[in-house]
Image (cartoon, rainbow, N blue to C red):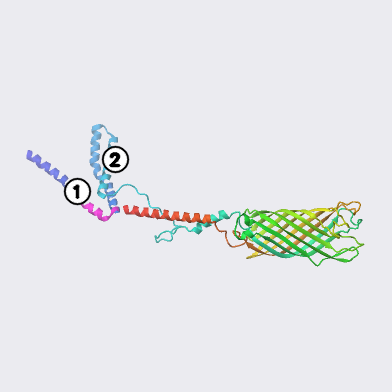
Amino acid sequence: MKSLLGALVVAVALPSLGGDASAATKMDEAGPLMAKAGPRHAVTLAKAKKRKRPASSGGGAGSKANTGDDSSGGDDDADKSASASSDSSDEAKEDAVLGTSKKKKAPAPVADDSESSGGGGGDSPPKSVESVSAKASPEEGSGEGSPASALELGLGAKAMFRQLAWTSDGRAAGLGPYNLTPGPETGLWFEFYPAAFGTSGFASNVGLFGHFNYGFGVATTLANGANMQTTFHDYLAGLKVRIPSGTFTPNVSISYGQQAFEIAQQQNMLDLPKLAYQFIRPAAGARIMFAPEIALDAALGYLLVLDPGSGADFIKSSRFFPKATSYGIDATVSLAVRLTGAVGARAGVDFRQYGLALHPDSTTRAVAGAVDRYIVAWAGLEVVLDGQGAGAGGDDEPKPSKRRRRHAETKSDDEDSSSSSDESSSSKSSDEE
């Protein structure tokens, strides 16, 4: 009987021992195969083995768990902790067999398509300094731009309309009214900002300006029908400061000027005194840019008249009104159009009016005052040279400052070093895997 029981035990033990031996043999054979397949295939095989293992061992574990449930009344928490410890021990064994670390590595940064130069896998070129400078230049160039020119020099033709009217009965005092419609003139005007050729700072907006007009071919017909020689001219020169602020550029100016209108005299006729106003003119104005090639200029000034005209046959002579005083105002509007390159055209209208206080007494004519009004329409061509940083109709864009360029270069170098470090980190990560 004992021999029969011993034979049964041996028969039952041999299959299980054979199964364990075959499993060990298979694991020994899988080790070299995993090593030859490489790390990635080894990881794949390990995952596949892990997925299969719970199914194979589930019966034994389950039977033990069921036995435990029957014996202890069903403790699920104990089963879960046992299963978790079994999984962790399995993972530790896999790490020991495969020689890999379960620590996750940071993925290599994905290259931006916009920075890559194709699908060849080469090094992506760094951002150019010009692209960064182009982003910086609009921020820096705002407020300085197209209105800032260095030189404007023009020549044109003008038509002057003049009206002189006495506030009292001039005929009774032997003074005749006067109208001129129109008188031809030739005109020259300029604005010059010397520092604008070398800088775009405050000094580039301080300049000189002025104009000179000369009349010709005009004769005045007196009351008796005689034609008398008539000459007229005016000039103005001063200092102007402009304040760039985008498309709207206000300016202030101070200047000195003179305007003369002279008619040759005849005795025993209605007299017309000569006038030669000398004045100081403070003014304020603005330039409005409708487009890079189109600009509107406007100005309003006050004329502080120093002398309305002294000397023989002038209004302050003993023949007329020695105590005469005067003041005036003027306004001008013009439209400039850049035709091509440095050549443009300009047309405008000027208005100027003087008020005369004659201060009569017992030795002078009984006339209290007069109004002397001038309206001039004009047009001509001009040469316009842009200053540094200006682009009034030009094709050049404002250049970034040296500080901006240095910042752009530094930023480009930092991006290059960051890119290279990322690439080295990525390659190192792949080598470790």
Seen at 29% across and 37% down, the residue is: 81
Residue shown at 9% from the left, 42% from the top? 7
Going by the numbered disc 1, the residue's amino acid type is Ala
Magenta stretch bounds: 25-39
The amino acid on which the numbered mark 2 sits, given as a three-letter code, is Ala
- Position of 61 relative to 346 (above/below): above
Q: CA distance from mark 2 to mark 1?
A: 24 Å
164 relative position to 17: left or right: right
What residue sits right under mark 2 in the picture?
84
Between 93 and 181, the one lying in front of the other is 181
Could you tell me residue 62's position as x and y percent? Answer: 25, 39
Q: Which tag, 2 or 1, sits closer to the chain's start?
A: 1
Question: Circle 1 — which element?
Answer: helix
**Few, some or many residues within 10 Å of mark 1 (<14, 14–19, 20+):** few
Measured along the vertical axis of the image, is residue 377 above or below residue 99? below
> Where is residue 302 shown, x and y percent of the image?
75, 53
